[in-house]
Image: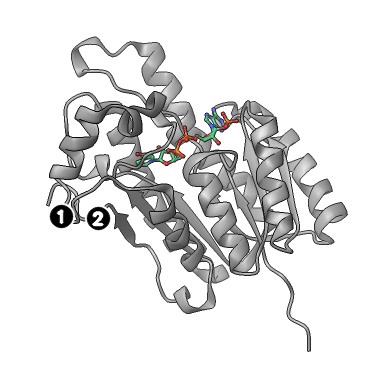
């Protein structure tokens, strides 16, 4: 008997954590569709790397802040599912795409606030809603939060609050989708060295040192610390993990 190859959709899979997740998911024998916002060439390289692992892959453009474009996105997604993956459905939705916002409460503008809400909450909510008809029963949803929903350094009030909203939303997803056998969990990375926030954690030695000093395992996180955890949540072994927040931070700000 042949088992059906499962399919994951990873938003923001062109770089950083999403790229690492996509490659780690492929290592589990799962086909992967990634989305990118502006970096089509980087996304194409990720597709090649997944294909080199013997898996099927595709990259689609998506702005997760632009809800009005989601119907068109899922039309294209459905066509690609059919043509490239010979399927009408997929199994794992990873809501990863996102941008940084560092701004104190006193000077955050309404525009900054709205942009962050659209990317980190409204977009995740409606992308998930519109993905549901395509998601197989028994599938999984993995939403990417942040350590900043638990600890509160100055300057991340909007971003951290929205990640908190994602964690609550995830529990509601688990409640409402349990009847379909769909589990929903949050993965909350600590500070990780990526392009995020202009490479702030990776390229600013002072910030990097402070984070390492406040991390029990004594260093800043790397993309490789994260992707495998998300990939694990896509495996059969993880089937009973549901409605959880899994922080992957090396023990930051304990
Ligand atoms: P990067 O900046 O390295 O990558 C961001 C990814 O998101 C890229 O693929 C980018 O696409 C995509 N993206 C950005 N804006 C949009 C948009 N409007 N619509 C769709 N896609 C978009 O960030 P990370 O990999 O570090 O972050 C990934 C996730 O992890 C985010 O949700 C972030 O909040 C979270 N996180 C990150 C931490 C860190 O320290 N790095 C810590 C905790 C959580 P493109 O390449 O085309 O521009």
Please report the residue visible at 53 percent of the width from the left and 70 percent of the height from the top: 179
Provide the secondary structure element on which disc 1 rests: loop
Looking at marks 2 and 1 on the same chain, the residue that comes earlier in the sequence is marked by 1
Question: Is 105 placed left or right of 197 in the picture?
Answer: left
Q: Position of residue 191 (x, y in %)?
A: 30, 41
Please report the residue visible at 52 percent of the width from the left and 50 percent of the height from the top: 20
Q: Position of residue 131 (x, y in %)?
A: 63, 49
Q: Are marks 2 and 1 in contact (CB under 8 Å)?
A: yes
Depicted 109 relative to depicted 32: above or below: above
Q: Quadrant of the N terminus?
A: bottom right
Question: Is 227 placed left or right of 34 in the picture?
Answer: left
Q: Position of residue 141 (x, y in %)?
A: 51, 57
Front-most of residues 5 and 220: 220
Residue sticking out furthest to the front = 205
How does the figure colour the protein chain or chains? one colour
The image quarter in which residue 29 lies: bottom right
Residue sticking out furthest to the right = 83
Front-most of residues 223 and 237: 223
| Count of number-bearing discs | 2
Question: Is 236 placed left or right of 2 in the picture?
Answer: left
The residue wearing badge 1 is 216
Instruction: Kindly report the distance in space between the C-alpha atoms of the residues bearing marks 2 and 1.
Output: 6 Å
Provide the secondary structure element on which disc 2 rests: loop
Front-most of residues 191 and 134: 191
The image quarter in which residue 64 lies: top right
The image quarter in which residue 62 lies: top right
Question: Is 103 placed left or right of 171 in the picture?
Answer: left
Res 250 label: 2
Q: Position of residue 43 (x, y in %)?
A: 66, 38
Q: How would you rate the neighbour count of disc 1 (Cα within 10 Å): few for under 14, some for 14-19, many for 20 or more?
A: some
Please report the residue visible at 25 percent of the width from the left and 39 percent of the height from the top: 148
Front-most of residues 217 and 22: 217
């Amino acid at each position: 008997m042949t088992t059906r190859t499962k399919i994951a959709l990873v938003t923001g899979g062109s770089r950083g954590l999403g790229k690492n997740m996509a490659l780690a998911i492929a290592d589990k024998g799962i086909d992967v569709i990634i989305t990118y916002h502006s970096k089509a060439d980087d996304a194409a390289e990720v597709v090649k790397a997944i294909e080199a692992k013997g898996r099927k892959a595709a990259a689609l453009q998506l702005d997760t802040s632009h809800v009005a474009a989601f119907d068109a996105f899922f039309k294209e997604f459905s066509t690609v599912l059919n043509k490239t993956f010979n399927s009408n459905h997929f199994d794992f939705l990873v809501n990863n795409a996102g941008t940084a916002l560092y701004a104190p409460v006193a000077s955050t503008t309404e525009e900054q606030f709205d942009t962050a809400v659209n990317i980190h909450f409204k977009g995740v909510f409606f992308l998930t809603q519109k993905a549901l008809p395509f998601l197989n029963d028994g599938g999984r949803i993995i939403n990417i939060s942040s350590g900043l929903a638990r600890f509160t350094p100055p300057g991340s009030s909007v971003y951290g609050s929205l990640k908190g909203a994602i964690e609550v939303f995830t529990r509601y997803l688990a409640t409402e989708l349990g009847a379909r056998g769909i589990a929903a969990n949050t993965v909350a990375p600590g500070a990780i060295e990526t392009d995020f926030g202009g490479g702030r954690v990776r390229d600013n030695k002072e910030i990097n040192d402070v984070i390492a000093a406040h991390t029990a395992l004594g260093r800043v996180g790397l993309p490789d610390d994260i992707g495998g955890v998300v990939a694990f949540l896509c495996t059969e072994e993880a089937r009973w993990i549901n409605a959880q927040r899994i922080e992957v931070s090396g023990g930051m700000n304990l």
